[in-house]
Image (tube, coloured by chain):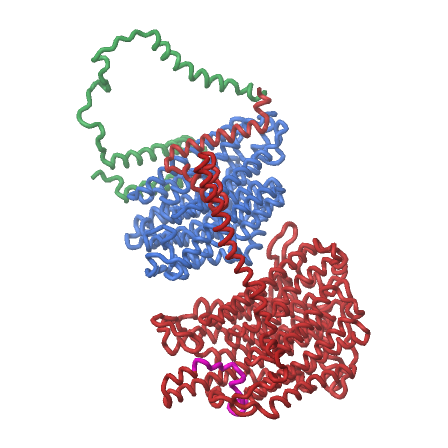
Chain colours: A blue, B red, C green
Amino acid sequence: MEASFDFWTHLPAVIPELLLTVLAVVVLLLDLYGGKENRRNIAFVSAIGLAAIAVTPLIWGPSEQQVFWGGMVRYDLIAQIFKVMIIIGASITCLMAADDSEVGHKGEFYLIVIVATLGASLIAAAADLIMVFVGLETLSIPLYILAAFRRDDERSSESGMKYFLFGAFSSGVMLYGFSLLYGFTGETNIYTLSQAFPAAVADNPLPLIGALLMLLVGFGFKVSMVPFHFWTPDVYEGAPTPVTAYVSVASKAASFALLVRVLLAVFPVTLVIGQENLQTLWVNLVSVLAIVTMTIGNVLALRQTNIKRLLAYSSIAQAGYVLVGVAAMQSQSDYSVASVAFYLLMYTFTNLGAFAGVLIFSETTGSENIKDMGGLSRRNPWLALGMTIAILSLAGIPPAAGFFGKFYLFTAAVNANMVLLAIIAVLNAIVALYYYLIVIKVMYVDRSQYDSQSIALSRSTLWVIGLTSIAVLLLGTFGAQPFFDWAAQGAQALLAL
Amino acid sequence: MEVNFSDPNFLPWLIPVGPLLAFFIITLATNRARLVPATSHEYGGHHPDYEGMLVPVATVPSRILSVTVGLAGVIMALFFSYTVAFSAFGEHGFGAEVVYASNIAWMATGDTAFRLGVFVDPLTVIMLIMVPLAVLMIFIYSIGYMAHDPRQSRFFALISLFAGAMLTLVVADNLLLLFVGWEVMGLCSYMLIGFWFEKKSAYKAAIKAFITTRVADVVMLLGIVYLYYATGTLNFRDILYNPELLEQLAATPALIFGSWGISAASIIGIFLIVGTIGKSAQFPLHVWLPDAMEGPTPVSAMIHAAAMVSAGIYAIIRIYPLLEAGGNPHYGILSQPMVLMAVVGSFTALFAATIAVAQNDVKRVLAYSTISQLGFMMAALGIGAYIAAAFHLITHAFFKALLFMASGSVIHGMEHGEHHVHEHAAHGHDDHHHDDHHGHFDPQDMMNMGGLRKTMPVTFITFLIGGFSLAGFPLITAGFWSKDEILADAFYGLTKGYGAHALVFIMLAVAAFLTAFYTMRQLGLTFWGEPRTEVAKHANLGRGLVSFTMTLPLIILAFFAITAGFVGVPPDFPILGPIFSPEHNAFHYFVIETLHPAFQAEAPAVNAIPVLTSFVVALGGLGLGWWMYWRKPLVAGEEDPLVGILGPVHTVLKNKYYIDEIYVAVFVKPSQAFSRFVIDFIDRGILDGILHTIARVATWIGDLFKVLNTWLIDGVGDGIPDGIFDFGGWVRRIQTGHVQEYLLVVLGAVLVIGIILALSTGILQAAG
Amino acid sequence: MNVLNEWAFVGIFIAIAWVFPALPIIIARFFGPKKPNAIKLMTYESGVETVGDTWVQFKIQYYLYGLVFLIFDVEMVFLFPWAVAYNELNFFAFGAGLLFIFLLTDALIYAWRKNALEWS
C-alpha cells in the first residue's frame, strides 16, 4: 500500500460489494436465529435488501472512469450499469424463490445467492486478472452449490456435478490463459497488459492467440457459447428453477461485462504484432462463434418438449445474438457496447419473467412439459399474459423489449460493416419465432389434462411477473431510448481506456 | 424541453391517453361476467340460442363501471382537446409561425434518431373539435343502445380503443404514428363489426372489412417506406412545410415506375391514396363499408362519421402538399395523384349515390351515402379544394353521426315494437303463427316502416335535420355550405376551362341531386304516411335512461348539423355573408395556415352559377322525393314507384351493380379454386404422382434411386422446416448427458479452433 | 522467433520431464530379471491383508469435520502474514484483517448452529 492510499476515495467503487457482504451476514444470522416459522421472510429480506443495494451504484455514480484498490477494481459507468442489472436480477430471483417449495424455506439458499451476486458484481468491475479469477470463482462455486441444491433429487445433484466439472475444467483452461499473459508480460492488470505486449512478445502473436483462445473458453463456458454450452440444458433442467433463472441472467450478464472489458482492453485495435491485428483476430473468432451459437441454439430448441430445456437452448441462442454485438465492437463505437448492455438489461427482465412463469406452472402442476401448458390462459390469464410478454420479448416482437434489444444489436453489426452477420442473425431470429410462438399457441389455444385446474398466484410471484412484464414493456416502448442512451454513456466510459 | 403538461406543446400527448387508459382498465379490471345458459333472455337480441351452452354475460357492477370508465376517458380526451383547441384559437398566426409540437427520440437509427411526437396545427385543431365531440355523443348513445347486450363491457373497451387510436392518429406528428393509429382502428373495426360474431353475416362482414382495408394498408405502408427512403424523415412538418424538398421529390423519377414518367412524389402519393381508398371506402375498395353496419349502430356511427373513414380523408388532407407537388391545381396543372383522386372521388360520389337510391335497408342507404360524400371530399382534394374538403369532412361527420344514430333509434324502436307485437301475439294467437311472423321480420327494412313520426317525434325531427343537412338544404344547413364550397371551387376551375374541374363539377352536381332525392325518399318511407306494419305502429323508444341517452346525442348533434356550416360562409355571399363572416371566412382563414404559403390559395369569389346549382340540385332532389314519397305515401303492400320507373336499372342498382358478385367471381372463387387446384392437382396429382413414380422406379432400378427418393420426399414434400427440424434432431445426439464426452468435444473444439487460428495467421508457416 | 527461443527451455524441460521417469522403467523392463512366484505376487499394503469389505461407510460427520477443518486450516494461511507484519500495519489493513476474522467467525457460528460440530 502506498502512503497516499485514501480509504474514503476508494470506498465508493465497492459500496455495493460491501453492502452485499453485510447483507450476507444478516441473512446468515437471520437463518440461524430467526426461527423456523420466519424462514420465508428471509426471502423478502434478501429481495428488498438486494433491491436497495441495486440503487447504490446509481447514487454513487462515478464522475469519470478510474482504477481503484491497487488496480483491482475499475470504477466506471458501465460497471455500475452491469452491477445494477446483476443485483436486480438477484433480487427478483430471491422473490421468485420465496414460493419454490424446495428451496424457498432454506436460509442458505439466499445466502449463497447473495455471495454469488457479490462475485458477479466484482467481475463486472474487475480490472485485474487476479480480481477476475477471484470474482469468477466467487460467482461459480456458489452456483455449483445452488445447482445441486435439491440434494435428494437425482437430476439436481447430477446437474450440480456436471456444472462443477465443466466449470472447473474451463476455469483451469482460463487460468492457464491468464498465466500465459502474466508469464509473457509480468503484468496482471488488464489495462496495462496491452502496453506490455510489444516489448514482451516482439513480433510473434502466437502466445497471445493461445491466451485469447483460453480466455474465450472460460468466458464461453460462463455465457454458454457453443461449443462450450453442453452443460446448459442439463443444468437448466436439473437445477431448481430460481437457480436456473439466476444462472441464465445474472451470471451471464456479469460474464459478458467481463468479456467486453477484457477483449477491448487486452486486445485493443491498436495492438498489432507481427503484422497481425489482434482485434481482427478475435472479431473474426467471435463472429464465427456467434453464428454457430445462434444457429445451434435455435435449431436444438426446435425439438424440445420440456419448457426449461427449451429456455436453455433459447438462452444459448440469445447468447449468440449478444456475441453479434460483441463482434460489432470492431467498429470501436459505443453503439455496439451499448447494444450489448441494453440487450442484457432487457434480457434480465425477460428471462426472469419467463422463468417465474415456468416456476409457478411447474409448482402447481408438477410438470415442465410444454404440452401440459395447454389452456394456461384459462387457468390463470395473468400468468399466461406475463409469460406471453416474456416470450414475445425473447422472440423480439414489439412492443416487448426484445425487439429493441435485437434491433440495436443488429444495427450495431450493420454499422460495423458486418452485414452478413446481421443477416444470419435475422434469419436465426425467424427460426426462433417458430418455437417461441408454439409456446404461446399452446397456452392460448390448446387444451390439456390440467385444463380445469386453476393456478393461484401468490403475492410475491405476482410481483415478479408484474415487475418483469412492466419492465419489459417499458423497455420496449418509451424506455428504450433513455436506457440505451444511458448504456451508450457507459460504453463511452469503457472505450475511454 | 422541460416536460410540462400545462404547456400546449405537451398537452396533445394526453389527448389519446384517456380512451386508451379506459380500454386497458375495462379490459383488465371491469369486465367481470357470469355464465348463464345461452337460452336465457339476458343473452337474447342479436344472438342465436345455443342449447345447453353457458355464455358469459357482463355483470351489472361491471357494466356500470365500464360505462363510467369509458365515458370518463372520452370526457378527459374532450377536455384536453378543447383546451388545446381554444388555446390555439388564441394564438396569432397559428399554423404558419406557431404550431404546438413536442417529440421524443424513439429509436436511434444510425446517426440520427427516429423521433415520435405530437403536432397540432389548424387542421388538427378542427379535428380535435369534431372527433371528441362526436365520439362523446356516440358513447352516450351507446349507453342506451348497448344496455342489454351481454358483452357491454367489451363493447366499451373496444370503442374506447377505437377512439384512442383515432385521437392518436389525429395528433400524430409523423406518418408512422399515424399509421399505428390507422392500423389499431383497422383492428377495432374488425372486432366491432364482428361484435355479434354469432351472426354469420357479422363475422363475414368483419373479415371483409379487415381484408379489404388490409390490401390497401399494405400499399400505403409501401408509400410510407418509400417516403422515408426518399426523404429520411416521416415528420409532417419537415416534409410538407419544405417546398424545396417537395419540388425535389417531384423532380426525381420513381424507382421502377420512373420510366413511365412517374415521379417519386407521385408514386408515394398514389400509394398513400390507395391506403385512403381502402380506409375511406372509395371505389373499388368500397365494398366493406355497407357490410360494416352488421356491427352495433354506434359502431357504424363511429366508422362512418367520427373515426375510420374520416381518418382516410384526414390523412390525405394532411399530406396534401405532397400530392400536389409537381403541379398546381389553381392553374389547371394536376399531378398524377390529384388526377387519380379527382376521378376516383367524383366517380365514387355518383356511383354510390345511384346505389343508395334503390336500397330499402335504412342503414344501407346511409352507408352508400357515406361512400358518396367521401367521394365528394376526395374529388374536392383532387381539384385542389383543400379547405372545402376539410370543411365538408367536419360537417359530414356531424350530420352523418346524427343520421346513423337516428337510424339506430329507428331500428331500436322497431325492435321494441316487434317485442310488443310478439308479446301481444303470444296472448292472442297460437305460437306457430307468431314464430312464422317473427322469422321473416326485418326491423331495418324501410318497407316495414312508415308513420314513425307519430311514435318517435324526436327521432323524426333530428333525422329530418340530419337528412336536410346531407341533402344540402340551402342556407340553413351545414351540408349546404360545405358542399357549395366544393362546387364553387370546381366551377371556378370550369370557368378557366380545366377538364378535371368540369368533370368534378358535373358529376358532383348530379350526385348532389341524387343525394337530396334518396334522403327525401328515406325520410318519406320511414316517417311519413301511415304505419305499413303492425310493428311500425308500436315502434317507440320507451321511457327511462335508454330512451334519454339515445335521444340526447341526437339533439346535440342536430344543433351542430345546422350551425357547423356558419363558420364557413363566404364573406361576399349576399346577405348572409356579412352576418356570419363580417371580416373573413372564419374556417378558411384559420385552416389555410396549415399549408405552407407556397400552397395557399384564395377562395374564389362567390359566383351565382354554382350557388344556383346548389339550390337547384338540393331543392330539385328534395322536391322530386317529396313528389314521389310524401305527396302520396306508400301504403302496406304497395311497390316502390322507382321499380316501375327505372325497370331493370333498378334491379342493377338494388344489387349494387353486382360488385360483390363480381368480386366473388373474380377474386374469391378463383383463389378458392386455385387453392383447391393446388391441393388436388399439384399436391395429389403432380407431387404424389412424382413420388409414386419415383418409388416405382426405385424398386425397379435399385438402391441408387431409393436414395434419390428419400431425398425428394425430404426436400420437396416436407420442405425446409422439416429439414431444420431434422437437423436439430441430428445435432441433439451430441447432447448425450455424459459430461466426459462433453469435455472431450470442448477440448477437440479448442484444438480445432486453435489450429485454424494459428494457420489463418500464418504463424506456423512462418515458424516452419 | 526470439520469444520462442527464449522460452524454448520450457519445452525442453517438458520433454526431459517425460524422459527421466520413463527411461528407468523401460530399462528395468528390458534388463531386469523376472522370476515371479505366488508369494511375490501377493497383495501387500501396509503389510496386512484386508479383512472384510474394503468399501465401508464412514460416519458422515467425519466428512463434515474434515471439510470444516480444511477450510479453516487454509484460511489460517491468509492470517499468517497479517500476524507476522502486525507492527507494520496501518489502520486499514488492521481493519481488513479483523473483518476477515469476523467473517470466519460467522462461518464457524453457522457450522456450529447447524449442528455440524456434533458428533452424534
**Range of magenta residues:** B438-457
Expressed as whole percent of the image width and height from the top left, the position of residue C63 reads 27, 35
- In this rendering, is residue A168 above or below B719? above
From the viewer's side, name the closer residue of A189 and A25.
A189
Q: From where the camera sits, is residue A117 visible?
A: no
**Tag count in the figure?**
0
Image side of residue B463 versus residue A315, left or right: right
From the viewer's side, name the closer residue of C118 and B502.
B502
**Which residue occupies the extreme right position in the image?**
B496
**Which residue occupies the extreme left position in the image?**
C51
Expressed as whole percent of the image width and height from the top left, the position of residue A263 reads 55, 37
Residue B308: in magenta span: no
- In this rendering, is residue B435 above or below B210? below
Expressed as whole percent of the image width and height from the top left, the position of residue B199 reads 46, 72
Q: From where the camera sits, is residue A111 visible?
A: yes
Image side of residue C94 versus residue B594, left or right: left
Which quarter shows the N terminus of chain B? bottom right
Image side of residue B507 versus residue A23, left or right: right
Q: Residue at x 33, y 61 (%)?
A: A452
Expressed as whole percent of the image width and height from the top left, the position of residue B628 reads 62, 89
Residue B443: in magenta span: yes
For residue B167, what is the image quadrant? Answer: bottom right
Q: Residue at x 46, y 81 (%)?
A: B440
Which quarter shows the C terminus of chain B? top right
For residue B101, what is the image quadrant? Answer: bottom right
**Which residue occupies the extreme front position in the image?**
B700
